[in-house]
Amino acid sequence: MVILLGLVSCLKDSDTTTVANYNETAITGFSLTAVNRYTPTTNKNGNDTIVKSTLTVKSYPFSIDHYQRKIYNTDSLPEDCDLKHVLVSVTKSTYTGNIVIKNIDNDSLKTYSSTDSIDFTSPREFRAYNNTLQKYRAYTVEVNVKKGDYNRFKWEKMPNTTPDIKSVAVKELEDRTFKLTIDDGQTWSDEEIALTEDVSLMPVSSFQYVSFPISTVPGGTYHLLIGMMEDEFYDEMYTVWRKITDDNGDNGAWVCLMNMNSELVELNYPGYLPTAEMTSLVYHNDAILAIQSDGSIYESRDQGISWHKNSKYSLPTELQAGQRLVAKGDDEGYVWLYYLDSNETWRGKFIKK
């Protein structure tokens, strides 16, 4: 046996060209024995971290297609699995001498060992040689992995709490000035509209507001205000306005971000934000999210100019869409959901790969 192992380890792809039949040599069983997982998550302080764990390998059986000589798993592994260092178990037929693996980058061959880790980041060729080492049967082994598992929102159910959400309102809209409250009317700030803007596009109801730091202005804060317009022609879209303030006392003037040069607004402004029964604005993952009670989440990565659905964002699947819903962000980077009908509270965060 020692002599055979030495011979196989020295084989090159050109040393033998005879292909064996199934009854001469074959791989009859294939399974994973050890796979590590490195999962992005957040610790109790809200900081990003990586947790190492071991995959439950028995949950991912492999199939062998002897006709096409393919070995593969039908249930894909999670994306956070380390495919560069995988241990496998290979079962061979009675007439099989040794199992060898072809190198990824060249034609050299290496004897299979159950204790040596294998790189499965790309399909690998396994060969089952007969007892004389003159014939072999080649199999393409592919380990399938899910895509997109960790560029997504991760939600967790929290103890039910009453949301501390402050209402937003606008009043005394006259000429190019108005008053704004973001704290249930406890305080009202004096605001002005830029001279270039059409005052008729200002929101008059269903207000929502969010603010966040903006790096392009020293000490700057970006303020975004949305709501319904008075003209019922636009009742299927929110009007979106913004202003920028700084630490030097510049209060800024509000400007409209919508392209409203034509009544065919759906054609000229395809990235508009649709209205919903309830909408909340949250700044998260360097984007503005509009979370709506119908289950939709719209994302704006250009500071409110255009809005689009992103498949990376979704609400908890355990909850039925259509509930009255409010959302807010916190200082630790979490998004909080408050379902008013079922009285449930959820907390989530976008987990980067």
Image (cartoon, helix red, strand yellow):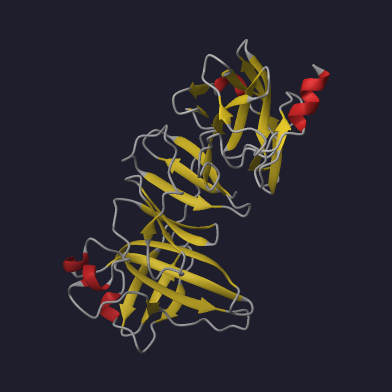
Quadrant including the N terminus: top right
Q: Is residue 338 above or below residue 1?
A: below
Q: x%, y% of residue 334?
A: 57, 49
> Which residue is rendered at x = 41% and y = 79% of the image?
254
Which of the pair 144/351 is nearer the observer?
A: 144
> Looking at the image, can residue 36 be seen?
no
Closest to the observer, 310 or 272: 310
Q: Is residue 2 above or below residue 210?
A: above
Residue 223 in sight: yes
Which is nearer the eye, 116 or 221?
Answer: 116
Which percent across, then down, holds residue 123?
57, 38
Left or right: residue 321 compared with residue 107: left
Q: Going by the picture, which residue comes out furthest to the right?
A: 2
Q: Left or right of 183: which side holds 259?
A: left
Residue 294, quarter of picture: top left
| Residue at image location 45% in from the left, 48% down from the top | 313
Number of disc labels: 0
Residue at 29%, 59% (x, y): give it.
Answer: 274
